[in-house]
Amino acid sequence: MNVNRRVFITYSHATTNLLSNGNSIAKLLESQFNGLKLFTKNNILFQLITPFNNAKINEYKIIRLPYLFQLGLQVSKVILPYKLKKNIFGTSDFEYICHIFRTAYFLKYIVNSNDIIIIHGSYRFLLLLKYFFKNRKIIYYHHGGTLDRIPKNDLKVLLKSICYRLISVSKAAIIPIRNMHKNIDYIHNGLDQKYFQMHLKNYSKIKSQVRKRLKIDENAFCFIIGGSMRKEKGYALLIDCLAKNNFERKIIVLVVGDIENNKDDEFFEYLNIIINKNNLDVRFLGHLKQNELYNIIVAGDIGFQLSSPKLSEGISIFILEMMFLRLPVIVSDSGGNKEIVTDGHSGITLSNYNIEDLKKAIIRMISFDNMEQISLNAFDHVNKNFSSQTMTKKMIQYVKHIDNNA
């Protein structure tokens, strides 16, 4: 193959093998990369840069530091105090620190001025590496909420160091700075439809089996909500709403997400007090592998993404997964949520972030005669606008724009 352009993709977090544990960023990167690698026939070589071997993605390039570098890092792991590591790198996590050095080595000695490097993840990661960006085409792929959440001075330094080459996952995130430079743009997250084929093909069978296994009566409403166990994710809004209101049928809430490692303990205890006091049927299922997560979504009747508007979500992978699996959704007006869900057509969006509005939204969804039609509208919408193919096409356009305007 005659390659005239190399595009490298990497991610800032290296504490776990992201591309094998089924989390949201892993699904996004895999969908994006598997789409992009098809363009190698156009003389563009896409490679994933990772410190891990990976079975799902063959075109990876493992960064390995020279032996003396590795030895030095092992020594620093032992002798550097916790506070010093925290102050220098923003973390004491040794794998993360190693990943910073690996990426710096890669930028300095492996890539050249013609290569394009796309870095997903934390802006702090890029700021630590900014001294290695000279004569390098760096694109920062920003995830999460609005860029307003980045301190102004840090954002200014970051944008200058990457020559304003920035992609965000939602339009809402870049509104404050979009007019600053033509290189600033957004590309909505997209997922590969193949993830959902098995569940869609066996939808009724899976739904029946999972509800039977979880002892969910066919007359009960099953609500699905997920994400990290933090106040901003809206768990309290849903649980308070169920505690203070009566609905026509029994409601069971299935909560998916890590409640071991990424949990606000005080908040989790507060939720359990409300649940026990009001005898609510709320089940915390913890972190689930992809297949089981999709089983749970299929078993549900309504899905929720109720992040606080102050959090300003990006494009929630969890919302996309629920819509790809034809689960009707109720979402808050947080960041990019309204870019995914059109109120009354592909789901319901809350006008106001309060219990009364959520109660009305639940009643409205339950009473919809065309609830199935809403789920089909949502399914069609995400397949057309939030697929990996759509995301890939926009990525290629952006890469060509950067290449032509170097």
Image (cartoon, rainbow, N blue to C red):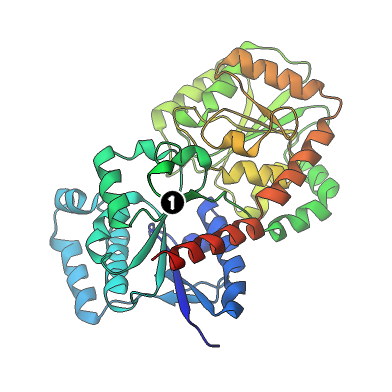
- Location of residue 115 with respect to 366 vertically, above or below: below
**Other residues around mark 1 within 10 Å, as few (<14) / some (14–19) / many (≥20):** few
What residue sits 46% from the left and 71% below the top?
7
Q: From this viewpoint, which residue is outermost toward the bottom?
A: 1
Task: Depth check: give the residue in front, 128 or 101.
Answer: 128
Instruction: Answer yes or no: is residue 243 visible.
Output: no
Left or right placement of residue 329 versus residue 112 in this view: right
Left or right placement of residue 257 versus residue 113 in this view: right
Q: Amino acid at mark 1?
A: Lys
| Residue for badge 1 | 182
Residue 174 placement: quadrant: top left
Residue 391 placement: quadrant: bottom right
What residue sits 79% from the left and 48% below the top?
206
Left or right placement of residue 278 versus residue 328 in this view: left
Q: Position of residue 276 (x, y in %)?
A: 56, 20
> Which quarter of the rendering shows the N terminus?
bottom right
Task: Depth check: give the residue in front, 331 or 164.
Answer: 164
Q: Position of residue 26 (x, y in %)?
A: 53, 58
Q: Element type at marker 1? A: loop
Task: Depth check: give the residue in front, 174 or 107.
Answer: 174
Q: Position of residue 198 (x, y in %)?
A: 77, 58
Q: Position of residue 103 (x, y in %)?
A: 32, 67
What residue sits 81% from the left and 20% below the top?
367
- Location of residue 168 with respect to 98 vertically, above or below: above
The tally of labels here is 1
> Which quarter of the rendering shows the C terminus?
bottom left
What residue sits 57% from the left and 68% below the top?
36
